[in-house]
Image: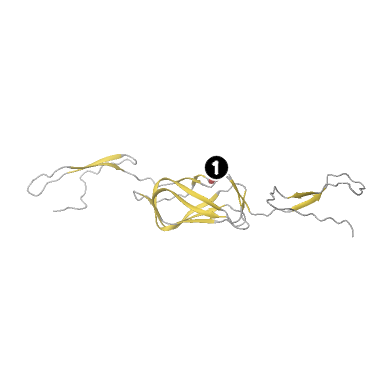
Amino acid sequence: GTRNNSALATVPTLVNGALYTITLNGQDISGNVGSTLSVTGITFDTTAPTITSVTSTTPNGTYGIGNSINITINFSENVTLSSGTITITLETGTIDRTVTINSFSNSNTASGTYTVQAGDTSSDLTVKTIALSSGDLEDIAGNAMSSFNIGTNLAASSAIVIDTTAPTITSVTSTTPNGTYDVGDTINITINFSENVTLSNGTITVTLETGT
C-alpha cells in the first residue's frame, strides 16, 4: 500500500541554494524490492525574496495634472501575491500619493500606475515606502517577504519631475531706456514669467495705459 510522511532514518544537513537529487526505493512485506525512483533538480531554498529596485517605463521628463506614470517593483526572484495588495507610497510633496498593486502570480516584477493630481510636486520622483497591505507575498518555495527595503530607488534610474504649479507673471519690464518718446517711437514691452512657458497657436495681448 501507500505510505505517507515517512521519516528518514538519518536526516541530512541541507545547504540553502544547493541543488539536490532525491532517490526513492522500497520493498514490500515479502521483501520484493521496487524500482528506484529519482527526482533531480530540486533546490533547497530558505531565502526570502527582496525588492532589488523600483523603476519606471515612463520616459524622463516633466509631468503635470492627469499624466500617468508607470511604477515597477523588481524582486530578487519570482513571487506570488495571493489575495492581497501592495501599497507604494511616493514622495509627492504635502500629500504623498499611493499606488496599489493587486494579486499576481509567479513574476519577478509588479507594476502600477500613478496619476498626477493637483498639488503634487517632486524634483525627482522617488518612492517613500512599500508595504504589504494584506495577503501573502511569497516565492515558489513558500518563503514570505519579510523586508520591504528598496535596493535601488526610482530616482536612481529615472529623472521624472512632477510640476502642477501654474506659471505666473512676475513682472512687466522694458529694455527701452527711460526718457520721453513721441509719435512713431518704439518701446519694448517684456513680460517675465515665473518659469519657462510655451505659447502655442495663440497670442498674448498687452494693454497699456496710454491716456484717453
The residue pinned by badge 1 equals 156
**Position of residue 13 in the picture relative to residue 87 (left or right):** left
**Residue at x-position 79% and y-position 51%:** 171
Left or right for 10, reference 50: left
In front of the other: 90 or 20: 90
What coloring was used for the rendering?
secondary structure
Q: Where is residue 23 shown, x and y percent of the image?
A: 21, 42
Tell which of 186 and 195 is nearer to you. 186
Residue at 76 percent across and 52 percent down: it is 170
In what element is the residue under mark 1? helix
Q: Residue furthest left?
A: 30
Asked if residue 172 lies left or right of residue 1, the reply is: right
Give whichever of 211, 98 is nearer the camera.
211
Q: Residue furthest front?
A: 184
Picture coordinates of residue 121 (x, y %)? 62, 52
Amino acid type shown at disc 1: Ala
The quarter of the image holding the C terminus is bottom right
Residue 30 x %, y %: 6, 48
Q: Residue 134, relative to residue 71: is it above or below? A: below
